[in-house]
Image (spheres, rainbow, N blue to C red):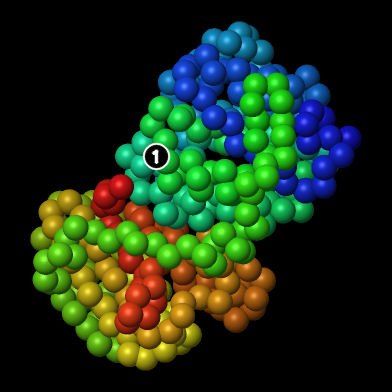
Amino acid sequence: MRSGAAAGHQGCFHEAAFYDSDQAFLDAVVPFLAGGLEAGEPVVAAFTRHHQALVTEALGTREGIKYIDAGLQYARPASAIDRYRRMLREYGNTCPAQVRLAGEVPHPGTGVPWEWWARYEAAVNRAFGSLPVWGLCPYDTRTLPAEVLDDVRSTHPFIADGTTHEVNPGFVNPETFLAGRRSAWRDSMEDGPPVATFRDPFPAQVRTAITRAGRETELPENDVRGLVLGASEAVSNALLHGTPPVTVRLWSSPQRMVAAVTDAGEGPDTPFAGLFPTSAEAARGGLGLWLAFQTCSFVTFGHGPDGFTIRLVAGRAEP
């Protein structure tokens, strides 16, 4: 039987908590973690080093929490979902009544773009939908931009406030939330001319152009290879499933590269594209965007007069 506020709930119990001090952070997460230990449930915490140190000091010598470095767990949304799903499947082999996960999701207040993390917070409601997981997402209101706060309230069915756990009246159905998003993110390099432009290219042409441009940057080889793979998959996806023409533009600087792939269509037919593969996508081999989300530093979707654009970044993306 599930314990705590999630007792009697079926499937994922996805909850946000807001804090404005170290003590408020502890007030939100320590009872959550300690309650799981007392109930004999698997407990996972993906925190920054600072917050992990606070928690371990508050809980003393108590053992049983699986700590994960937040920077590694939340490097990319698709990877985070994939790791959590594999972890939950492993815990499922021991048939726990509930698994508790607490994690600090990145946002512009921590120096990263928010768009794909907003999509992540909506998507986990479906990715973990039938699993007996209680997920707590603490957010620091001292660094949280107003638009991010709005998205957090829209993507969490429950809100924690100290010892209370309330149904969130502002929660928006994930499909509705994602379908209504129209990202306006673009890189400042796009104000200048691209280093390469293609119309209806073969994926190999794009791979070659990115590889050559990458040699002129200071980016690690793995970052360039990630963009090569991600952009190639995006181009293949646009050619197979999009509407012609397909245009590819590439911008490059010493610290960053951006590839924009545009077709005249409406974009993916699933709101969860890139974040986790649905059964329909897997059946038709449509895993290209999911692979792109696994390899690039940042990926975002946009709609404009020319159609649908996927932007892929190597290097540190601008918030």
Q: Position of residue 54 (x, y in %)?
A: 50, 15
Q: Position of residue 241 (x, y in %)?
A: 48, 85
Relative height, residue 312 to residue 170 (above, below): below
How many numbered dots are placed on residues in this image? 1
Q: Position of residue 236 (x, y in %)?
A: 40, 81
Q: Position of residue 13 (x, y in %)?
A: 72, 42
Relative height, residue 59 to residue 51 (above, below): above
Quarter occupied by residue 293: bottom left
State the residue at coordinates (65%, 52%).
Answer: 125
Quarter occupied by residue 103: top right
Judge by depth and name the residue closer to the eye, 223 or 309. 309
Relative height, residue 28 to residue 177 (above, below): above
State the residue at coordinates (30%, 47%).
Answer: 319
Element type at mark 1: loop
Tell me if residue 175 can be seen. yes
> The N terminus lies in which quarter of the figure?
top right
Q: Which residue is mark 1?
A: 145
Type of amino acid under label 1: Pro
State the residue at coordinates (11%, 66%).
Answer: 192
User: Image check: 310 left or right of 66?
Assistant: left
State the residue at coordinates (49%, 51%).
Answer: 118
Relative height, residue 165 to residue 120 (above, below): above
Q: Label 1 neighbourhood size at 10 Å, few (<14), some (14-19), many (20+)?
A: few
User: Image check: 127 left or right of 190?
Assistant: right
Tell me if residue 79 can be seen. no
